[in-house]
Amino acid sequence: MVKIVFDNNIPIYSQIVDRFVIDICSGTLPPGSRITPVRELAMQLGVNPNTLQRALGELESMGLLFTERTAGRFVTEDAALIDARRREMSRSVVSEFMEKMRALGWNDEETVKLITVRRGENE
Amino acid sequence: MVKIVFDNNIPIYSQIVDRFVIDICSGTLPPGSRITPVRELAMQLGVNPNTLQRALGELESMGLLFTERTAGRFVTEDAALIDARRREMSRSVVSEFMEKMRALGWNDEETVKLITVRRGENE
Amino acid sequence: MVKIVFDNNIPIYSQIVDRFVIDICSGTLPPGSRITPVRELAMQLGVNPNTLQRALGELESMGLLFTERTAGRFVTEDAALIDARRREMSRSVVSEFMEKMRALGWNDEETVKLITVRRGENE
Amino acid sequence: MVKIVFDNNIPIYSQIVDRFVIDICSGTLPPGSRITPVRELAMQLGVNPNTLQRALGELESMGLLFTERTAGRFVTEDAALIDARRREMSRSVVSEFMEKMRALGWNDEETVKLITVRRGENE
DNA sequence: GTGGTCTAGACCACA
DNA sequence: GTGGTCTAGACCACG
């Protein structure tokens, strides 16, 4: 968690949340790992500490982070919760994707074909 | 184009734009077809005429609509432009999808599997 | 005076006026020549007779056209007036041009250079 | 950017856009410079904030301005883009000019002569 | 304090 | 009756 390319049309705090969620779900931030202190991290990211605070608050209320009074903030140890969120997110990402493709006039077979054809091509 | 379920958090005008783009790309609004007059459509959608005007203005600057002074607004007759946009959108939707899935820790094979398994399940 | 490519962002009547002024000043419509009757010309141009009427009215009030009760409309025979307008228009076109180029940061020498370089190139 | 003499018949927002384009292209508003806040500038210009907002929005969609969430609006740092637009505008201004002069019955040599003679005369 | 969005309501030119 | 523009004034999210 060092650089984020911020998109100016999405609230910064929200982009930070997203990034944390992804890093936690994908294991980049493993369960129990310690989060860099707010002020320091805010500086690294080049954002206002209030903004970062807000993002971390949301992550806590999701249960993905927890605060140990004096020791700092940590990623939850609850691997099941992380995995649940990962699957839930995946499901919704897939749903939204299929819906969008359908709205664009591709039926499901065509969508699958597009996606498999695309594999192997460079981004 | 009668009802849109508006999602707060996203600008109304932007949701209207998206809807039109999709309706045009998918052929629901065929090339050359006439758009309901601004005021009338605004009433149908339950939004202020100015808001709708803004949306239509953006669609015009994308080239998807054009205005005939005093006669009304129409979908472009340029089928190639429509198709180009459809393909471009599809490509970006697929790209974003693959990227998100990769961020969530699925490799491309797994993603394809998830998507094909999903077919046939309930929405 | 058969085809005009109408620009949708400028009033049609005004585009018709401009075209007539130019055709008269450049001699394409020589002094004394007869104008096609309103209804017929309106059909040729594909515009509403009212619109054409308005345009012709303006041209009359400029003195470039005149109406002979029963015989129809004609281009003025006053060559001096036509020439005066031609010079006046030329002067203002040149003035506006120089002003625009200056606003774009070219001094007069550069402008002249740009214009001479351009000569001979295809449009 | 303090006073603009508004010409009725042309939309205010459009005149504001033109003025900004020129000020940016000519370097009066250098790359990266900050734009006066919408409300304040609207007051200075004596127009409604919405009207100004619209103008600025168009400039943004041209890529000449960009917005930094809550910090303000700035001129793009992309000097190449600015220069490209300047040259493009110059070319089209020159083209239109030559075309008009030709329509008025001057051939290119005469036009050049007119323009060079004109230099040194009073505006 | 910054930009962004929206509504309400009005007026205009054009055809 | 069509689109286009403008004002006035309000509310919101963000930092």
Image (cartoon, coloured by chain):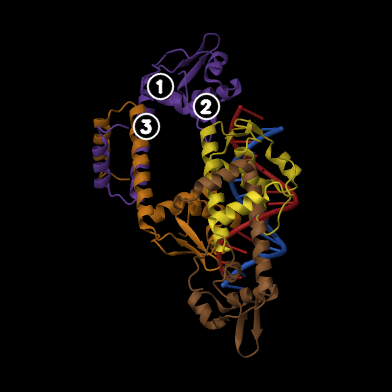
Chain colours: A brown, B yellow, C purple, D orange, E red, F blue
**Residue beneath disc 2:** C58
Q: Amino acid at mark 3?
A: Lys
Q: Are marks 1 and 3 on the same chain?
A: no
Which label belongs to residue A39?
Answer: none
| Along the line of sight, the residue nearer the viewer: A1 or D69 | A1
**Residue beneath disc 1:** C24
Could you say whether the residue bearing mark 1 is in a helix, strand or loop? helix
Which label belongs to residue D100?
Answer: 3
Indicate the quadrant containing the C terminus of chain C: top left, top right, bottom left or bottom right: top left
Residue in view at x 54 percent, y 59 percent: B107
Give coordinates of residue B78: x percent, y percent: 53, 32
Give coordinates of residue D78: x percent, y percent: 39, 58
Q: Amino acid at mark 2?
A: Glu
Name the side, left or right, on which C8 lies relative to A91: left
Chain for numbered disc 1: C
Could you say whether the residue bearing mark 3 is in a helix, strand or loop? helix
Residue B20 appears in the picture as rendered? no
Residue in view at x 67 percent, y 59 percent: B9
- Mark 2 or 3, closer to the camera: 3
Q: Amino acid at mark 1?
A: Ile
Crowdedness near tag 2: few (<14), some (14–19) or many (≥20) residues, C-alpha within 10 Å: some
| Along the line of sight, the residue nearer the viewer: C60 or C122 | C122
| Cα gap from disc 1 to disc 3, whole angstroms | 14 Å
| Along the line of sight, the residue nearer the viewer: A27 or C18 | A27
Residue D69 lies in what quarter of the image? bottom right
Indicate the quadrant containing the N terminus of chain C: top left, top right, bottom left or bottom right: top left
Q: Are marks 2 and 3 on the same chain?
A: no
